[in-house]
Every structure is written in structure tokens, then in C-alpha cells.
Amino acid sequence: MQRRTAVLLASLTLSCAACDPGSEAAFTRGRSLVPCDQNIPSCPGLFATCSLNSTTYARLTFPQGSPFRFLVAALPQESIELTLFFVTQQDVGLDTRILWYEPGCADVFTYESEGADLFAEAEETNTISRKQTVYSGGDHLIEVFTDMQAEVDIGVEVLVPLRSQ
């Protein structure tokens, strides 16, 4: 009887952790960890280390993992939303930049933190998200540059635009 109670308690504890929107289990639910150790030609002189989509995520330790380069497939007019889940937070740093490239790197869109405290923004959910609409279909190189000291899970969602009727 005690063993069944202990097993039930352990499973309830795990399932409750996954229900907490600020938990790592909630962030990774339905996603597989991707080892980002490839060299995928992406732009002249730039290589991605992996491809991410809505069912995958990567784990990086910054600043050692900076810059982090990966690919995301998207169609024209879709938005690529990048979410950072802070597993550990040591120092927010001064500069975090995210670059979204169009296929072939003919154009680039940039987010700059400009010294903002991203850890404070992530306070309740341990996450921050940034998104950018892309205008050409294909594989988009995404780069994350940061001097923060943190272990971070990175996930993406490709958002389809609403069509007016």
C-alpha cells in the first residue's frame, strides 16, 4: 500500500510540474531536444548547427553558445516566433540580439535588447518571446547573439497569418 501511495504521489508531482507554465516541463512538453552539432551551409560564410520547428528545441549555455545559428522553415508572410526558456539565470548581460534572415540572406530583421533586463521580463514564466514576419518562403537562418550568463532552452513556432475574408 505504501509503495502504491509513493508511486501515485511521485506521478502527481511530475504532472503538476508540467502544468506550471513557468516550468521547464511545460516548455518542453511535446518537443524533442535536438543536438545542434551540424554544419549546414546557410548564407555565404555562415553555417547553422541544426533545424528547429514546433516539435523540437535546443539547449544552450550562454555566453559560450553565442552566436547560436539554426534554421527554421517558413512560408511567405508567416511569422517566426522564437522563445527562450531560462533554465538557469546568472547574469542578464548587456546585449542580446536576434537576427531573422530571409532565405539566401538577402535581407535581415533584427531585435536588440538595448540593455533591457530580459530576466525581469521573464519573471513569471521564465520565458521571453520575439517574433518576426518573413516575406520569402524557405529555410530562414536565425542567429542569437548574447553576453548573458544562462542555460537556455530555445524553441520556435511558425505562425500562419490570419486571412481576411
Image: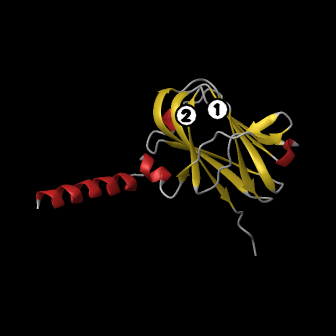
Left or right of 2 on screen, residue 18: right
Report if residue 22 is visible in the image. Answer: no
Secondary structure of residue under mark 1 = loop
Task: Pick the quarter of the image with the N terminus.
Answer: bottom left
Task: Pick the quarter of the image with the C terminus.
Answer: bottom right
Residue 80, numbered circle:
none
Which residue is at 74% across, 58% downward?
78
Check disc 2 and report the residue beneath it. 118
Secondary structure of residue under mark 2 = helix
Q: CA distance from mark 2 to mark 1?
A: 8 Å
The location of residue 26, given as percent across then percent down, is 44, 53
Left or right of 45 on screen, residue 24: left
The location of residue 12, given as percent across then percent down, is 27, 58
Count up the numbered dots: 2
- Neighbor class of circle 2 (other Cα within 10 Å; few <14, some 14-19, many 20+) is many
Which residue is at 75% across, 44% downward?
141
Q: Is residue 99 above or below residue 17?
A: above
Left or right of 138 on screen, residue 16: left
Check disc 1 and report the residue beneath it. 113
Which residue is at 64% across, 32% downward?
113
Q: Earlier along the polypeptide chain: callout 2 or callout 1? A: 1
Report if residue 126 is visible in the image. Answer: yes
Quadrant assignment, res 163: bottom right
Q: Nearer the viewer, residue 102 or 132?
A: 102
Tag 2–tag 1 contact (CB < 8 Å): yes
